[in-house]
């Protein structure tokens, strides 16, 4: 065991979901080591503890795993449970943390960010409940990164991670597990696999695009081997270090191959994609795209049809920028709907306190209290279960849902690669004008409320401020502006747009048209295009 002298490295502050940087930054001397030591220090040491370790298979995944293992051993950890080849999807890691009652886990991923030597890498810590570390803990880790003087590491050969079984690294036990098995078993307890199998036997076709990222092995095992979807239903199913050049963000822009297939004449009955680390999902039917906010609402309204949720839901939660479609379901079903800031870490307390069963974000993330992360394949299986029971197409499910609850038109516009200064100045300027906005009439609509969203956690009383600027019009239409906390260069401005339509004659509009006046009002007030010099968003979802 050696103690290595080091010095603080600037900028190791975890964002929305862990620390994300360019891979080459992570590969710099001491960079990963400093952060990992700070993780252990930030949670009060690793001695005698058990952790889960795995990642999404991107470039540097296995090298980083070997370093983390040697550091865990040198810090006195008792056991590390590692996915074979250092692979684990984020939801599978969350499950293993809970299943084995461990002290937490380290997940190596930059999620939906591209992978490769010149792209992104990331590390995040999950708590013993299986969920992302809350701000109090990531804050303690960041503080350690600013004062670190040394880290501990074992000098040893690499551990062979290619075979399931147990081995030793110094005094620490390394348990290598199949990345899929326990997760697949969990899914079988939640969903009616018989009914879904019958669906496929009846000729139902699915195209699941794993985008050369972590969910490939999960999709092959669960959808093809266990549920009988024909071989070839899972595409891009082998995790590659650079994701085969794909940008593993499951939205219509980046999952364009899937979108093309679903628009074609021979479109399968159901299309789905997931992201780098497997916690997100996009759902598409032939000729119909399901917005993530609507997907959450549909799952909330139909969850009782799946055996794991047959007793109904305790409550639901959504991130603030997510549309209020799920609120309308909750109201009808007599449940509480909580609103939290962006990022899954804010849902953990609500689930641990038994207040909510289902949670979701507009960014293609849905999940339940079966783990403490969003879960892409889970959402896809839930959809399949619902389709199997209701015997309707995706389009019919959506039309029926809007008839019952109205349609919350929704869109997110991302302006990427904006100069940090420009983005910060825009936010500061908006903040300064918030008090003057209520009462003003913009694009023919009166502003009812304008604020900088702050969250008061009802379980632990913690307060998180500056979580997004919202401008809400009379009648409930609104836009929200916040800066992304997952990027690795420059700033990304996210503009979230929503308006509710209750007239059934107007349910089939193009969301960009239905939201036209809200889009114009946002530009009039925030002047994003003018300030960034862009004529429109880089990505529209
Ligand atoms: C984005 C999404 C947010 C999500 C986060 C992590 O954060 O907006 O909803 O929880 O990514 O998802 P931001 O700060 O860039 O808006 V994942 O699947 O990339 O870990
Ligand atoms: Co992700």
Image (cartoon, rainbow, N blue to C red):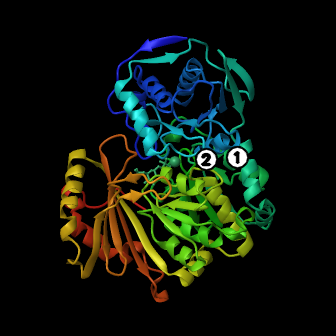
Residue 388 drawn at (x, y percent): 73, 69
Residue beneath disc 1 = 183
Between 80 and 244, the residue placed more toward the observer is 80
Residue 321 drawn at (x, y percent): 41, 63
**Residue 445 position (above or below residue 115):** below
Tell me, for residue 285, which label it has, or none: none
Q: Is residue 485 left or right of residue 236?
A: left
Residue plotted at (47% across, 38% down): 115
Asked where in the image residue 262 lies, by quadrant, the reply is: bottom right
Residue plotted at (34% across, 61% down): 453
Is there a contact, CB below 8 Å, between mark 2 and mark 1?
Answer: yes
The quarter in which the C terminus is drawn is bottom left
Between 419 and 269, the residue placed more toward the observer is 419
| Cα gap from disc 2 to disc 1, whole angstroms | 8 Å
Residue beneath disc 2 = 91
Residue 338 shows up from this direction? yes
The quarter in which the N terminus is drawn is top right
Q: Is residue 270 left or right of residue 361?
A: right
Between 133 and 67, the residue placed more toward the observer is 133
Mark 2 or mark 1: name the one nearer the start of the chain.
Answer: 2
Q: Callout 2: helix, strand or loop?
A: helix
Residue plotted at (54% across, 31% down): 61
Number of residues whose C-alpha sits closer than 10 Å to that of mark 2, classed few (under 14), some (14–19) or many (20 or more) = many
Q: Callout 1: helix, strand or loop?
A: helix
Number of residues whose C-alpha sits closer than 10 Å to that of mark 1, classed few (under 14), some (14–19) or many (20 or more) = many
């Amino acid at each position: 065991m050696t103690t290595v002298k080091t010095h603080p490295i600037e900028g190791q502050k975890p964002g929305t979901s862990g620390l994300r940087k360019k891979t080459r930054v992570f590969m710099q001397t001491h960079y990963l080591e400093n952060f990992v030591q700070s993780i252990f220090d930030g949670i009060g040491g690793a001695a005698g503890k058990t952790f889960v370790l795995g990642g999404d298979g991107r470039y540097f995944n296995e090298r980083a795993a070997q370093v983390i293992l040697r550091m865990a051993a040198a810090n006195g950890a008792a056991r590390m449970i590692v996915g074979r080849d250092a692979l684990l999807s984020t939801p599978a890691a969350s499950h293993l943390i809970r299943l084995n009652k461990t002290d937490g886990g380290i997940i190596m991923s930059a999620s939906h960010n591209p992978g490769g030597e010149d792209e992104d890498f990331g590390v995040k810590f999950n708590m013993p409940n299986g969920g992302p570390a809350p701000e109090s803990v990531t804050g303690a880790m960041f503080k350690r990164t600013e004062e670190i003087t040394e880290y501990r590491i074992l000098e040893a050969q690499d551990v062979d991670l290619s075979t399931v079984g147990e081995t030793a690294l110094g005094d620490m036990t390394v348990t290598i597990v199949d990345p899929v098995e326990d997760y697949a078993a969990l899914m079988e307890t939640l969903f009616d696999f018989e009914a879904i199998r019958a669906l496929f036997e009846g000729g139902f076709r699915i195209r699941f695009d794993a985008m050369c990222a972590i969910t490939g092995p999960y999709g092959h095992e669960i959808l093809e081997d266990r549920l009988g979807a024909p071989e070839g239903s899972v595409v891009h199913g082998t995790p590659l270090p650079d994701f085969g050049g794909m940008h593993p963000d499951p939205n219509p822009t980046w999952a364009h191959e899937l979108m093309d297939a679903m628009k074609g004449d021979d479109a399968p009955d159901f299309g789905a994609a997931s992201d780098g680390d497997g916690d997100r999902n996009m759902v598409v039917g032939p000729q119909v795209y399901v917005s993530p906010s609507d997907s959450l609402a549909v799952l909330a309204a139909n969850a009782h049809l799946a055996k794991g949720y047959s007793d109904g839901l305790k409550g639901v939660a959504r991130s603030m920028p997510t549309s209020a479609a799920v609120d309308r379901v909750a109201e009808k079903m007599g449940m509480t709907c909580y609103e939290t800031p962006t990022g899954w870490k804010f849902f953990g307390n609500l689930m641990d306190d038994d207040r909510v069963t289902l949670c979701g974000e507009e960014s293609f993330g849905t999940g339940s209290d079966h783990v403490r992360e969003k879960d892409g394949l889970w959402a896809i299986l839930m959809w399949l279960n619902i389709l199997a029971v209701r015997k309707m197409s995706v389009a019919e499910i959506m039309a029926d849902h809007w008839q019952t609850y109205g349609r919350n038109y929704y869109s997110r516009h991302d302006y990427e690669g904006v100069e940090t200064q420009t983005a910060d100045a825009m936010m500061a300027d908006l903040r300064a004008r918030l008090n003057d906005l209520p009462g003003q009439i913009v694009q023919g609509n009166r502003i009812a409320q304008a604020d900088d969203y702050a969250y008061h956690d009802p379980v632990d009383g913690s307060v998180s401020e500056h979580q997004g600027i919202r401008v809400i019009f009379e009648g409930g239409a609104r836009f929200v502006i916040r800066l992304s906390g997952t990027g690795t260069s420059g700033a990304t401005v996210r503009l979230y747009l929503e308006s509710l339509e209750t007239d059934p004659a107007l349910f089939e509009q193009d969301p960009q048209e239905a939201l036209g006046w809200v889009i114009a009002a946002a530009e009039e007030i925030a002047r994003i295009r003018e300030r960034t010099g862009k004529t429109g968003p880089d990505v529209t979802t």
